[in-house]
Image: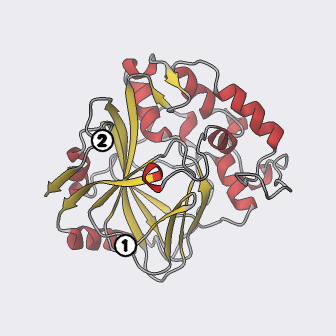
Amino acid sequence: MEKYKRNLDAIDHTQNRYNDHNKIHIHPYDPQVLEKVREDFLLPRTCKEFIDWVDTHPHYDVVAEASSQYIRGTDRSEAFWQCANIQADWQSINDKITKYCLDNEIDTKFDTDYTEEWRIYDMKDQNTYVPFRHNSELDNQRKHGFKKQYQLIEVTLTDHFAELKDIEQLFEFDWAKTDINYQPTSGAFPRHVDFLTTAFKRAVEFDERIANAKYNPLTKCPEGWVLKRILIPTDSWYPGQMFSFEEHFWTDWKPGQVIDFNWAHCRHATANSGYSPRPLIKITGLVKESHWLAKGEWRDFVL
C-alpha cells in the first residue's frame, strides 16, 4: 500500500486543464483519463469490491469527478434543500466549539496538509481522528493553490461534544458519522463531488449486509439503502462566507437549519472570505428507502 501514500514530491503531473472553456463542466483533469476512469467506475461491483477499488485508486479525485451525473441548469430544489429544523441551545453549542478551536489553536495553525491515509487501513484502528481526504485529491488541490480548505473536528469517535451526538441520534442513521466542518477565515475548498467514504467504509467493514450488497454507481449507494449527508450550521451566516452547489448558492443560514443535498452528483465548493469562522455539523449515514429523509419529508426537532 505504500505506493498509494502521496506527498509533495509525488504530485501527479499527468493532470492538465481543459483549454476549451465552453465545456459544460470545467475541471483540471485529463479528459482521456477521466473517460477511462468513468468506464471503470460503472463496472458492476459489490460494496466491498467498490471500496477496495476506490480506496487504492491512484486518481481518487478523478473518480469523484467521473461519478457525477449533474446537469447544469438543474433546479435549485434538486441541488440542495432544507429538510428539518432543530431548536436547541445553539449559543452554548457554538461557544463549546469556539473554545475547543481556541484550545487546539485550530485557527492560528490553520493549514491543510498531508496525513496518514485512513483509507488503506481498517476503520477499527481509528480511535480518535479520521483524516478526510485521499492524498491524491490533496495533490491536485495544492497544485492549484488550495492549501487551506477547512478543519475537520471528529465527533463520533471521541468523547467530546455530547450535545452533537444527541443531534446525530435524531436522524436514526445506520453507521452514522458526525464531524464539525470548521472553516476559519481564508479557507477555500475547491469544487468537488462527494463519495461519503468515511461512513460507507465503516459500514462495509462491520456490516456484511452492506459489504455484500450490490453497489449502484448511479446513486452511489448500496442497493436497498440510501446514503445521506446533512449539514447543520451552529452559527449564523456572516458576510463573506460562501457555499455553492454548482450554480446555486446557500446563504444567510441560521443555526439549526438542516440541509440535505444531492451529494452524489452536485459539485459543491466553500470559501470563507469573511472575518468570522464558519462552523457546521456534518452528519453522514445510511437509511432505508422508507426513512423520512429518503422520502423527502420534513421534521421539526426540539432538544
Residue at image location 30% in from the left, 41% down from the top: 293
Q: CB atoms at circles 1 and 2 under 8 Å apart? A: no
Residue at image location 46% in from the left, 40% down from the top: 198
Identify which residue, 86 or 56, lies in the foreground.
86
- Coordinates of residue 40 in the picture (x, y in percent): 70, 26
Three-letter amino acid code at disc 1?
Asp
- Coordinates of residue 60 in the picture (x, y in percent): 66, 40
Report which residue position mark 2 lands on. 293
Query: For the residues carrying marks 1 and 2, which lies nearer the camera in this image?
Result: 2
Identify which residue, 261 or 136, lies in the foreground.
261
Q: Residues within 10 Å of mark 2 (few under 14, many from 20)?
A: some
Examine the rendered structure and indicate whether residue 249 appears above or below residue 26. Answer: below
Q: Is residue 161 left or right of residue 40?
A: left
Q: CA distance from mark 1 to mark 2?
A: 36 Å
Three-letter amino acid code at disc 2?
Leu
Residue at image location 60% in from the left, 67% down from the top: 148
Q: Quadrant of the C terminus?
A: bottom left
| SS type, badge 2 | loop
User: Residue placed farthest to the bottom in the image?
Assistant: 275
Residue at image location 53% in from the left, 34% down from the top: 121
Examine the rendered structure and indicate whether residue 221 appears above or below residue 247. Answer: above
- Coordinates of residue 76 in the picture (x, y in percent): 47, 56
Report which residue position mark 1 lands on. 103
The part of the image, by quadrant, that contains residue 90 is bottom left
> Of the residues under marks 1 and 2, which one precedes in the sequence?
1
